[in-house]
Image: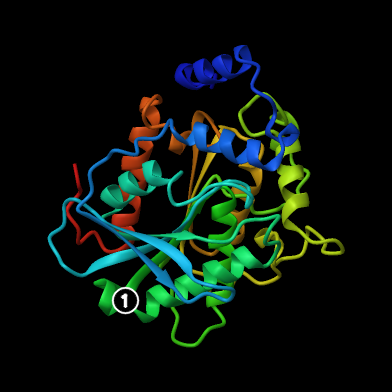
Amino acid sequence: MPLDPHIKRILDMLAAAGAADASRLNLSERREAFRKLMSLSESNVAVGHVEERALPGPDGPIRVRIYTPIDTRSDRLPGLVYFHGGGLVAGSLDTHEGICRPLANATGCRLVSVDYRLAPEHKFPAAIMDGYVATLWAVEHAAELRIDRDRIAVGGDSAGGTLAAIVCQLARQARGVRLAAQLLLCPITDFAADTESRCAFAEGYLLHKATLDRDLEHYVPAGLNPADPCVSPLRAPDFRGLPPAYIHTAEFDPVRDEGRAYADRLAQAGYTCHPGMTHLFYGMTSVVPYARSAMKHIGVEIRAAFGGALRHAG
C-alpha cells in the first residue's frame, strides 16, 4: 500500500523545510526537534483527572503522571504503566500528553506515565531500572491508586516499547508481580538488527536508521554489546511466562520487522501492521485521521484483554 496521503504531506513538508536528520543534531536540538514533532498529537484531549507524583527511585525521585479516563463505571480500574518514546535520549511526560490522554480514554485504564532518566546523562541501565521500579511501585500501591492489581499492563512506544518489553522480562522473575499484558507501539526490540525493513526504510520515512544508531551510541556504554538481551529484548533466550502482547508496527518503519519477530517469539501475541503508516503515526492524531482510528482499535484490543468489562469511551 502507498504512504498515507496525510503522512506523505508531513514528510514532504519536513523535506521542504530542510529538516535535518536527527542523527546530525546535537542533543539539545534533537530533544527540541522531537518535542516539536510530538506537537502533532492531541494534547488537549479531556480526561477525567490528572495528577503527578514523585516516587522513590534508584538515583533520586521518579516523576509519574497519572491519567484517569474520562468515562468510567468503576472506581477501581485496570492500570497501564507507560514509557514514552524518544530513542532513550529524548521525550518527557509533556511530549507524550497527546498519546497518554487519548490512550487512557481508549483503553479505560488508569495510565501511569513514567519520566525515566535519559541518556547520555544517564546511560544503560538507568532507564530500565527506573521503568522497573515504577512498575513495581504501581503494583505495590495499586489499592491507593485505585487500580486493579490483577489487571496491570505495561506499554510504550518506540524505545518506550523496548523498556516495556524488558520490564516484562524482569518482572517475570519477581515474586508477587504478575503483569497482565504488554502494549508495544512500533517497538525497538533489537538494536543489533539488520532486517529488510531497516534497509528499505533507512531514510526518508521519519525515523532514520542513522538516528537509531546515534541514539544507541548515547545509550549504551562502551564495551556493552547491543545484542545483549538487556538492551535488545528480542535476543532474550527464554520467552516463557511473559504476559500476552499487543504489538503494533507501521508499514514504512525501519523497526517494523523486529516488532513482528518479537510477536512471533511470544506464545500469546496480537500483531497489527498499520498500512501506509510510518514510525510515530500514533502520535499524529491531530493531522492523520487513521491515527485516531488506530487509537480506538488499540482501546478495543486492551479492553478485550482485560475481560471487556469496561464501557468504551467515546
Residue at the outermost left position = 73
The reply to whether residue 196 is in sight is no
Q: Residue at x 57, y 49 (%)?
A: 187
The residue beneath circle 1 is 142
Circle 1 packing at 10 Å, graded few (<14), some (14-19), many (20+), is many
Which residue is at the front of the view, 208 or 253?
Answer: 208
The reply to whether residue 45 is in sight is yes
Residue 127 image point, x, y percent: 60, 63
Q: Is residue 105 left or right of residue 23?
A: left
Q: Residue at x 61, y 29 (%)?
A: 206
Which residue is at the front of the view, 116 or 233?
Answer: 116
Residue at the outermost right position = 223
Amino acid type for the residue under numbered disc 1: Ala
Which residue is at the front of the view, 133 or 225?
Answer: 133
Residue 252 image point, x, y percent: 60, 30
- Residue 30: which quarter of the image? top right
Residue 297 image point, x, y percent: 34, 42
Q: Is residue 74 left or right of residue 119?
A: left
State the scheme by which the image is colored.
Answer: rainbow
Q: Quadrant of the C terminus?
A: top left
Q: Is residue 220 left or right of residue 291?
A: right
